[in-house]
Image (cartoon, rainbow, N blue to C red):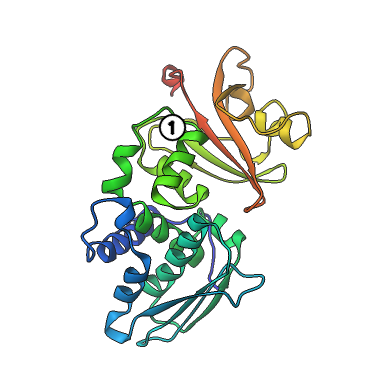
């Protein structure tokens, strides 16, 4: 069982991303459509016979990796998965093989494992690796500037790179120059937050505020926001409890596959004059 702590360090995230880019460099890709996972799986274990990808044979799990140290192995993927989910599942399993080579693998992964991004676990490491393998910086970062922040923009990127929404959102917040933050909630509780480098306020943790769009959805007062909408800053940010004048932009959607709410926050107006 992998140990967990408060978060995956920036150094370890960089190591995971670098390992993905090193593997991807062997293909000399120039477009998202050229990221061939069957070839990458073979390259990841080329010296020991490669990794074979097989579909079907799984009921509750989305993916399974079976491999031994110093040997090749197999990646099995649940039949019928949406293309983006299938590709992310395969990339996640390749990540375990590359990042954790000294242990025998017989791992099964469910959709919940693909929501683990913000703790110091091997699952988070494999997710960061998979996101970079499918959406490498040199291809993904320029496309982050092709529209204003919204889940619709993330849908467009997700479709172009044939990946999952959660991974696309994580990559977007990591590489964009916009002041955005990703919030993932389970029921009425915020599970974790990832802020872009220029998003300086701290996002509140704990229970979703009822005055946010996500809070109204949880309470059954509204559905998904469907676009960027205005929410009061006090509903999301710390230390602004008495600010009843300003808003933050919010786009929230409940995702059946993950069983979680995905929220993209955007500081459209600059709040930096309040920075201490």
Which residue lies most toward the top here? 245
Quarter of the image for residue 46 reads bottom left
Q: Which residue is mark 1?
A: 199
Quadrant in the picture for the N terminus: bottom right
Q: 43 or 198, which lies in front? A: 43
Q: Residue at x 45, y 80 (%)?
A: 74
Q: Residue at x 41, y 55 (%)?
A: 131
Can I make out residue 121 in this image? Answer: no
x and y, in percent, of residue 100 in the image: 41, 74
Q: 183 or 40, which lies in front? A: 40
Kind of element beneath mark 1: loop
Q: Residue at x 32, y 62 (%)?
A: 20
x and y, in percent, of residue 173 in the image: 43, 40
Q: Is residue 166 above or below residue 41?
A: above
Q: Is residue 112 above or below residue 229?
A: below
x and y, in percent, of residue 156 in the image: 44, 39
Left or right, residue 75 beside residue 186: left
Q: 214 or 55, which lies in front? A: 55
Report the number of numbered marks. 1
Which residue lies most toward the right here? 220
x and y, in percent, of residue 268 in the image: 46, 21
Quarter of the image for residue 221 reads top right
Quadrant in the picture for the C terminus: top left
Can I make out residue 174 in this image? Answer: yes
Q: 180 or 165, which lies in front? A: 165
Quarter of the image for residue 133 reads bottom left
Q: Residue at x 29, y 74 (%)?
A: 43
């Amino acid at each position: 069982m992998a140990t967990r702590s408060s978060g995956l360090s920036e150094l370890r995230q960089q190591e995971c991303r670098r390992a993905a880019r090193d593997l991807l460099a062997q293909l000399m890709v120039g477009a998202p459509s050229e990221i061939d996972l069957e070839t990458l799986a073979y390259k990841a274990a080329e010296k020991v016979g490669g990794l074979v990808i097989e579909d079907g044979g799984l009921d509750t799990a989305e993916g399974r990796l079976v491999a031994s140290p110093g040997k090749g192995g197999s990646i099995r993927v649940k039949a019928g998965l949406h293309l983006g989910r299938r590709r992310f599942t395969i990339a996640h399993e390749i990540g375990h093989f590359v990042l954790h080579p000294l242990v025998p693998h017989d791992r099964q992964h469910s959709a919940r494992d693909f929501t683990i991004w913000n703790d110091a676990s091997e699952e988070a490491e494999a997710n960061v690796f998979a996101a970079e393998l499918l959406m490498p910086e040199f291809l993904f970062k320029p496309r982050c500037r092709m529209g204003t922040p919204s889940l619709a923009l993330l849908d467009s990127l997700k479709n172009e790179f044939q990946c999952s929404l959660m991974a696309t959102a994580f990559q977007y917040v990591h590489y964009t120059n916009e002041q955005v933050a990703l919030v993932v909630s389970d029921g009425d509780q915020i599970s974790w937050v990832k802020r872009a480098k220029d998003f300086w306020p701290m996002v509140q943790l704990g229970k979703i505020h009822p005055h946010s769009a996500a809070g109204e959805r949880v309470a059954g007062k509204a559905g998904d926001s469907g676009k960027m909408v205005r929410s009061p800053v006090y509903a999301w940010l710390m230390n602004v409890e008495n600010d009843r004048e300003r808003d933050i932009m919010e786009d929230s959607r409940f995702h059946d596959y993950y069983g979680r709410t995905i929220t993209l926050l955007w500081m459209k107006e600059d709040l930096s004059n309040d920075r201490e």
